[in-house]
Amino acid sequence: MKMPSVTLPLQAYRAGLRVGEPALTGLLAWRAHHGKEDPLRLPERRGLPGRARPVGPLAWMHGASVGEVLSLVGLVEGMIGRGFSVLVTTGTRAAAELIGARLPPGAVHQYIPLDAPRWVARFLDHWQPNLAIVAESEIWPNTILALDAREIPLILVNGRMSERSFRGWERCPRTAKALLARIAVCLAQTQEDAERFAKLGAPRVSISGNLKFDAQVPPADPQQLAYLGAMVAGRPVWVAASTHPGEEAMIAYAHAVLKAKFPQLLTILAPRHPARGTEAAECATALGLRSARRSSGGRPHPSVEIYVADTIGEMGLFYRLSPLVFLGGSLVPRGGQNPIEPVRLDTAVLHGPHTENFAVVYRALDRAGAALPVRDGVELAAVAGELLGDAARLDSMAQAGQRALQPFEGAVARTLAVLDPFVAQMKLQRLEREGLMRPLARA
């Protein structure tokens, strides 16, 4: 199949990032100064390798941030079992810190380079992947064009295309097709996602489901779990997880209302971005509530009402301490956060009206009675108050959540089944090359 030509907007984008390298270097320095990049590994963002390439076939897998890269762990293990080494790249520090502790032997981590042509070429020159696998909605034009030029198959897994993104790409259909046509296979999460990718020009689209349903539950340090569990024993506890600006004030308000009914109530407040811990604590202070920040060494002592969990990689610990969680990004228009992990850890779920990012799973949880929607801080306080006083209902919701997730499982196996023909072809090509080399060596 003849590939669509590179459009003028893509040519302009490519040229702009080529001449804009100095500006990108300055941007990286600014981000490192503000803690958004790892200064010790900043060269990786310019395509400079931080370690040697493993010997043998290599699969490159990319997940932009925490949720995306954690969803790839099952595929990483599957490809290692098929004889590949795996390079895993991320774009955020939080994702790098989390995935570094969860990668199995045979996998290495690097930061992905910014999409400047020379930096992408430098990255590919060193790593020479045999296969590229990208999660969800990471469409970087120069990277896609470079992979296509080198005839490296690119597979989009766990593909997600929101209605908003679809409308944006619809305004430049030739450019969208020029990029999506260069994706060997697009594995979408849902029928709606698949239809959007196909309408924009992706030639080979199928539905594999959401890899996040197969992801392992987040771990918890056993000593910390025992320590904090003993400290909060006997207190009603709930978690407000992955909150965004505007939501922490509603959580503090809900706590202030609930403390009349539950004087010993502990609210564990985990902002989506831990750097906002101070801001979250200030929302508690504004209502006269006593808070402590975990990043500063604070602990949920009996006098602490709101415990700000502003650390990375500990949500598995906090979910295990509570039978009820409110998931943020949903009372403000941010599309909602992933409910799969807390449900897997036997918590009932509350959420706001904005759940577009995970619409399918929230619908399933709501229908099963495992999750309940709330419209604002007032309704959040009312519903949370009912549930915290009804242990039997919380347990029933947790069990319903487990049942509701079962039909969605199996995405890892379906995705690996699609990858197997590529793996087989690469093995065949390697055998052919070895067969051609032997006679030359004897001559």
Image: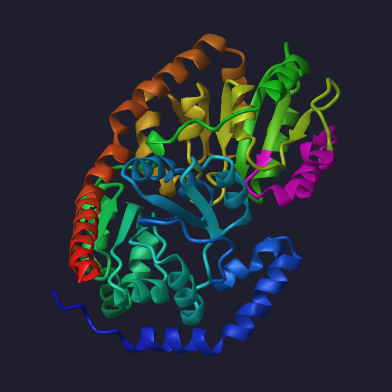
Q: What is the magenta range? A: 270-296
361 sits to left or right of 372: left
Q: Residue at x 40, y 40 (%)?
A: 77
Q: Position of residue 441 (x, y in %)?
A: 25, 68
Query: What is the tally of numbered marks visible in this picture?
Result: 0
Q: Position of residue 168 (x, y in %)?
A: 37, 70
Image quadrant in which you'd find residue 30: bottom right
Q: Quadrant of the C terminus?
A: bottom left
Q: Residue at x 50, y 30 (%)?
A: 217
233 sits to left or right of 403: right
Image quadrant in which you'd find residue 27: bottom right
90 sits to left or right of 429: right
Of 422 and 210, nearer the camera is 422
Q: Position of residue 213 (x, y in %)?
A: 38, 35
Of 285 and 408, nearer the camera is 408
Image quadrant in which you'd find residue 256: top right
| Residue 16 versus residue 275 in the image, above or below | below
| Residue 337 versus residue 341 in the image, above or below | below
149 sits to left or right of 296: left
Q: Is residue 253 visible?
A: yes
Would you say residue 240 sits in the magenta stretch?
no
Of 80 and 299, nearer the camera is 80
Would you say residue 278 sits in the magenta stretch?
yes
